[in-house]
Image (tube, rainbow, N blue to C red):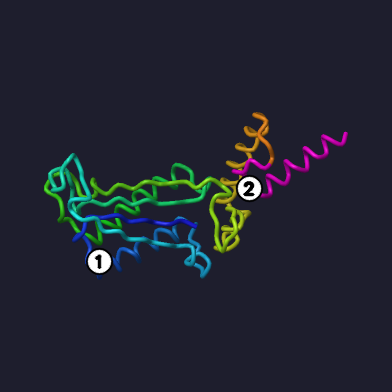
């Protein structure tokens, strides 16, 4: 269930460029979901655009292009579920998003001689397991995987599960209560059963 929030300097994108970038970033979102180009996968692929006026977007203490590389000022927040990506996945996202912006917005827009894309900032924000909701209910990474058609037996979800199992061991060791959140529901249930069994001995 990734989301991209694209903030850019007003005038950097016209209506046609915005539509083209939305398509490119949607393709990135689908790739991020392990190629889940399904109805469910596309329903989770959200892209937002916010244009900032010149006097609302400052770089290096200035509003002009003195410290800006082509194609201009862009800040893209990519919101993903916790445990969804390893470092290699995140590095791909940084490269894919920057390439999409540079390809669509072009090489104009800055006054510095630095390489195109150096003023395209991509920030990946991870939402703690259990803090993402849909339809009035919290949804888990386990639910998302099923909704987008991603196999829970594949390597991508296997990596996520291993991450949460390691997190669960640390939380159990530290004495966190079972309902503290932040774990896959199946792992929380397993811990609760194990504690209940231990208490009845």
**Residue at the farthest top position:** 174
The residue at which mark 2 appears reads as: 184
Distance between the alpha carbons at the discs numbered 2 and 1? 39 Å
Please indicate whether residue 146 sits to the left or right of residue 43 in the image.
Answer: right
Secondary structure type for disc 1: helix
**Residue at the farthest right position:** 201
The label on residue 17 is 1
Q: Residue 141: image x %, image y %?
A: 57, 53
Q: Residue at 50% of width from left, 57% of height from top?
A: 1
Image quadrant holding the C terminus, namely top right
Q: Residue 156: image x %, image y %?
A: 55, 51
Please tell me how crowded label 2 is: few (under 14), some (14-19), or many (20+) other residues with Cα within 10 Å.
many
In this rendering, the answer to whether 47 lies above or below 163 is: below
- Of mark 2 and mark 1, the one earlier in the sequence is 1
| Residue 185 counted in the magenta span | yes
Quadrant of residue 149 in the image? bottom right
Quadrant of residue 139 in the image? bottom right
Query: Which is more toward the observer, 23 or 82?
Result: 82
Q: Residue at 39% of width from left, 50% of height from top?
A: 93
| Residue 98 counted in the magenta span | no
Q: Which residues are magenta?
A: 179-201
Secondary structure type for disc 2: loop
């Amino acid at each position: 269930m990734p989301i991209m929030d694209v903030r850019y300097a007003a005038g950097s994108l016209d209506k046609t460029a915005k539509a083209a970038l939305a398509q490119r970033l949607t393709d990135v979102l689908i790739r991020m979901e392990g190629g889940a180009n399904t109805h469910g996968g596309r329903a989770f692929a959200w892209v937002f655009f916010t244009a900032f006026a010149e006097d609302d977007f400052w770089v290096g203490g200035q509003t002009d292009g003195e410290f800006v590389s082509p194609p201009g000022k862009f800040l893209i927040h990519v919101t993903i579920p916790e445990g969804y990506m390893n470092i290699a996945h995140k590095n791909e996202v940084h490269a894919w998003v920057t390439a999409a912006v540079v390809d669509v917005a072009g090489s104009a827009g800055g006054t510095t001689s630095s390489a195109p894309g150096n003023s395209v900032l991509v920030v990946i924000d991870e939402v703690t397991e259990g803090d993402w909701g849909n339809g009035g209910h919290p949804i888990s990474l386990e639910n998302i995987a099923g909704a987008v058609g991603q196999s829970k037996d594949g390597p991508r979800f296997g990596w996520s599960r291993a991450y949460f199992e390691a997190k669960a061991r640390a939380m159990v060791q530290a004495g966190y209560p079972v309902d503290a959140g932040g774990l896959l529901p199946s792992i929380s249930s397993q811990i609760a059963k194990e504690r209940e069994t231990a208490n009845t001995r």
